[in-house]
Amino acid sequence: MKHEIVQSDITVVGGGLAGVCAAIAAARQGRTVALVQNRPVLGGNSSSEVRVWVCGATAHGTNRYARETGIMGELFVENQYRNPEGNPYFWDLVVLEAVKAEPNIRLFLNTDVHEAEAGEEEGQRVIRSVTGWMMGSERRIRFESRMFLDCTGDGLVGFLAGAEFRLGREARSEYGEEWAPEVADDITLGSTLLFYTKDTGKPVRYVPPSFAKDIATTSIPLKRVIRSGDNGCHYWWIEWGGELDTVHENERIRDELWSVIYGIWDYIKNSGKFDAETMTLEWVGSLPGKREYRRFVGDYVLNQNDILAQRPFDDRIAFGGWSIDLHPPQGMYATESGSKHLHADGIYHIPFGSLYSRNVENLLFAGRNVSASHVAFGSTRVMATCAVMGEAAGAGAALCVGKGVTPRELRERHMRELQQTMLKSDASIIGLRNEDEADLARRASVSASSAMTRIRVDRAETAYPLAADVGILFPVDGPIGKLELLAEADEDTVLRAELWDTGRPENYVPKTKREECEVKVAAGERAWVTLPLSGGAFESPANAFLIVRANGRVRLFDSLEPVTGVLAFERGAKPVVSSDLEDHQPDQPVIEWSMRGRARRPFCFAADSGAYGPDKAIDGFARPYGGPHMWVSEPLAEGRAEWLELAWESPVHAAEIHLTFNDDVNEDLINLHHHETPFPIIPELARRYRLEVPDGAGWRTIAEASGNRKRKRVHRLDQAVAADRLRLVVEETNGGPRAELVEIRVYGD
C-alpha cells in the first residue's frame, strides 16, 4: 500500500458534470486542481454507467434561447459533432478529453474519498484535507488544498467536514412555497435504473430470473407508459426509494429496481401484448441514478418563489430553466402521474450565495447538493444546470485562492469581478453586460460590409392551416416598417393579429398586448398581406410577439430557412407525453405557446429591424436578451466575404482577440438519444475566417481559421500588433446564409 499527499490550490471531489466543469473553470484561471472521482469514468449520471441524458434550461425545447454556453456548451457542441447518435461511451470520451486538455488538472479516477480533516478557526470550520482510497491501485491519498468543492451529489465531503445541510422536504411555512408539504418530512426523490434494448433481427427467447417482479400484479401497467421500442431515459419513471434513505439503503433500492426492470422485460417479451419477438436486452444498469440526498445550507437558500418570479439576484452566476419537477414518493408504484411540473415564464437566475457553505469557510459545492429548498431543487437538480453551477463554483474558488478570501468575502467584495471573469469565458449568465475595462473593443467604433436591416422569411415550403392561434417572435429595434405575412384564403375573410411584448427581456411568451388590427384577406392563392401594426409602442429594443388568431379559412406558410432572432409558436399544441406520466399544466404560458416541432421552421413574414447592426458585436451582451445581440450580415455572395471592422482613434496593441460566433442557443442539443439534431455542426457558425490589420494600402492577416465548429475562439498572437483598425473577415459558414458574430473582444499585451 502506498501513502501519498497531493497538494493543489483546489480539490474538487466528484467527477459528474458539476465537478468536471468546476475543475476546468478553476484550471483555466491558472489554479492547480485535483479532480477526484470514485468511479472509473467521468460524467456521473450522464456517464455510460448510468446513461441519463443531460437536461438543462431548454427543458427539451420548452424554453427558448436557453441552451447553456461556457464549458457545458462546449461539451454539448463537441458531442454533437463527434457523437450525433448518442453513444454513451463516446460521450464518456468527450468529457474525459475536456479534462485531459487542461494541464492544471490532475485526475484521480476510482478514488473514493471517505475522510475529511476539519477544525475550528476563528469561529468557522475549515477543511484542511480529504483522504481517499484508490481502488485497484492500493493507494491511500491525502488531498491538501486551500479550497474544496463538494460535487459528490450526495454531499459526503461537506457532511464529513461538518457543513450544515438539509434532508427531505421543508414545511410550506418556511419559505412560503405552494408546492411544499404542510409539515416537514424526510422524503426525497427516488433513484432510477435504466436499460437498453436492441433488435437482433431473429427470434430471441427470454427467461426471467427468479427475482423478476410480476408487474401485472402491480399498478405499473395501469399508470405508466410501456412500449417495446422504448429504452434508456424513456423509462426514467422506473424510480423508487423516495421514502427510504437513498444512500444507506442504496443496495435495497438497486435490487428492487432490478426486479422491476427484468419484470418489465418479461411483460414485454412474454405477455403477448407487444411486438418484441426479435428484441433483446442489450444493457441493464447496476448503479442507481440518485436524484436527491443532502442539500447544503449556504448564505442563501434558493426557493420556489425565486424561480417563479425569475428573481434577478445581484450575485447571479448561472441560470436554470427546467421545470420544478417533483415525483411522488412511491415512485413507479404511485397511482398518480409519474411527475408534476411547474414552469416559470422563462429561465430563472441562480445566486452565488447558494454555492458555498455558511459554516465551513473554504467549502463550495455544485450539483444536486446546492443550497436550495426541496421544491427549488426539483429544477436545479438537472445536469446541465448542475454543470453551469459547477463552472461558477470553480471560477469562484480560483478567485478566492488568488485573493486569499473566503467565498463569502468574494460575494461581498468581489462579485462583479467574478461575474465579469465568467462572462469573458462565455459562461451562462443572463442580462449582464461585458464591463471589462481591459477589453479594447469597448472603446472602438464599429462598422461592417453589410448588415441585415429587413427580416424577410420568404422561402415558402408548405401551407399551414391556421386552425389555432400561432405566434411569431422577432426583434424590434427601431421602426418595423411594413409588417407583412404570407397567406392564402379559401374565401374572403378577416385576419386578426396582435402585437405583444414579452415582459422580461429573457422571456419569449406574450405578456402585454401593445397593438391589434384586423385586415381583409381576399380569396386566392398565396400573397403578402400587410398588417397595419407600427411597432411604435416599443420604446427600446425588445422582442415582439405577433399573435395571429385562428381562422379556419386561412393558411400561412412554413419556411425551412431559419432567421436568427425569429421564432414560431403554436398555441395549445398537444403534449408529447401522456399526462398520466407527466403533468405539465397546459395553462402555463411556456406550455400554452409551444415551439416543439417548430424550431428552425418560421412562418413566412417580413419586417424591418435594427437588431442586427455591427454595433451589436460590442454592446456587451453575449446571449439573446430582449433581442439577439449579434451582428448579422446580408447573405454571403459567391466569391465575396463579409467583414466587421473595429476602429480606434489611435493605434492599440492587440495581443489577444476573442470571437464568439452564433451557435444558435435555441437549438436543443442532447448528449444521448432523446432526439437527434440533423446536422453535426451548427450551420450559423463561421467555418472559415481571418483577422486582419491595415498594412500600407492593403490588409495583413494576423490570424485565421478553417474548419471551425466552435462558438468561442481565442486567438493569442505570438507578438502584439499595433493597429488603429482590426477586421474580422468571414469567408464561409457551416451552412448558414449569413456571417453572424455574437461578440468580439480585444486585449493588449
Image (cartoon, rainbow, N blue to C red):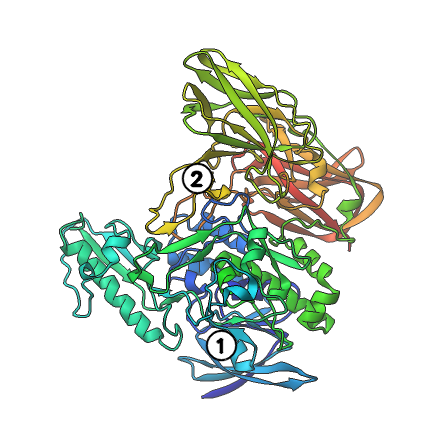
Q: Secondary structure at mark 2?
A: loop
Residue 284 in view here: yes
Residue at the outermost right position: 650
Query: Which label was assigned to residue 596?
Result: 2
Q: Secondary structure at mark 1?
A: helix
Q: Is residue 129 left or right of residue 42?
A: right
Query: Which label was assigned to residue 660?
Result: none
Q: Does 329 appear above or below 201?
A: below
Residue 381 in view here: no
Residue beneath the point at 63% across and 63% down: 352
In this orientation, which residue lies closer to the viewer: 28 or 517?
517
Q: What is the crowding at mark 1: few (fewer than 14 residues within 10 Å), some, or many (at least 20)?
A: many
Residue 628 in picture, x, y percent from top left: 62, 39
Q: Which residue is mark 1?
A: 156
Residue beneath the point at 13% across and 57% down: 205
- The quadrant in which the C terminus is found is bottom right
> Residue 136 sits in which quadrant?
bottom left
Q: Does 590 appear above or below 418?
A: above
In this orientation, which residue lies closer to the viewer: 108 or 352?
352
In this orientation, which residue lies closer to the viewer: 44 or 749?
44
